[in-house]
Image (tube, rainbow, N blue to C red):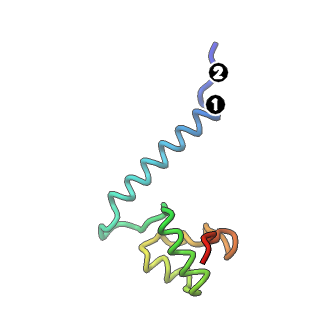
């Protein structure tokens, strides 16, 4: 009688959003602990820091990840220079 909720795009989207929010909250609570693997959720401030270090100052991805406490490979997921860029006027 009713459609299968697992095939409803709106429900799938809400479930994914809820799952990501829980993961981000868990990451936030674990930050700073010695066994924390590093951050992979980025806020706007952190993203801008990454772009300035990478694109304007030429700092290597591995060094940025180490300095900012990010998981390995986070910068790779942003793509090469120009894919994600700082749009604020300088």
Quadrant of the rendered image containing residue 32: bottom left
From this viewpoint, which residue is outermost toward the bottom? 58
Quadrant of the rendered image containing residue 83: bottom right
| Crowding near the residue tagged with mark 2, few <14, some 14–19, many ≥20 C-alpha atoms within 10 Å | few
Residue 18, compared with residue 29, is above or below; it is: above
Mark 1, secondary structure of its residue: loop
Q: Horizontal and vertical percent for residue 37?
A: 40, 67
Per the image, the residue denoted by label 1 is: 8
Quadrant location, the N terminus: top right
Per the image, the residue denoted by label 2 is: 3
User: At 54% from the left edge and 38% from the top edge, which residue is drawn?
Assistant: 14
Q: Are marks 2 and 1 in contact (CB under 8 Å)?
A: yes
User: At 44% from the left edge and 79% from the top edge, which residue is drawn?
Assistant: 66
State which tag comes first along the sequence, 2 or 1.
2
| Crowding near the residue tagged with mark 1, few <14, some 14–19, many ≥20 C-alpha atoms within 10 Å | few
Q: Horizontal and vertical percent for residue 89?
A: 62, 74
Q: Is residue 14 left or right of residue 28?
A: right
Mark 2, secondary structure of its residue: loop
Q: CA distance from mark 2 to mark 1?
A: 8 Å
Quadrant location, the C terminus: bottom right
Q: Horizontal and vertical percent for residue 34?
A: 30, 70
User: At 36% from the left edge and 66% from the top edge, which residue is drawn?
Assistant: 36
Q: Which mark is residue 18?
A: none
Q: Horizontal and vertical percent for residue 68?
A: 43, 75
Residue 20, compared with residue 41, is above or below; it is: above
From this viewpoint, which residue is outermost toward the top? 1
Residue 39, compared with residue 4, is above or below; it is: below
Quadrant of the rendered image containing residue 86: bottom right
User: At 60% from the left edge and 70% from the top edge, which residue is drawn?
Assistant: 88
From this viewpoint, which residue is outermost toward the left? 33
């Amino acid at each position: 009688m009713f459609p299968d909720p697992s095939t409803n795009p709106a429900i799938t989207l809400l479930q994914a959003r809820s799952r990501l929010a829980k993961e981000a909250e868990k990451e936030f609570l674990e930050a700073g602990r010695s066994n924390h693997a590093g951050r992979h959720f980025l806020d706007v401030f952190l993203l801008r820091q990454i772009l300035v270090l990478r694109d304007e100052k030429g700092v290597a991805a591995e060094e940025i990840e180490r300095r900012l406490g990010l998981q390995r490979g986070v910068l790779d997921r942003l793509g090469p220079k120009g894919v994600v860029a700082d749009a604020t006027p300088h």
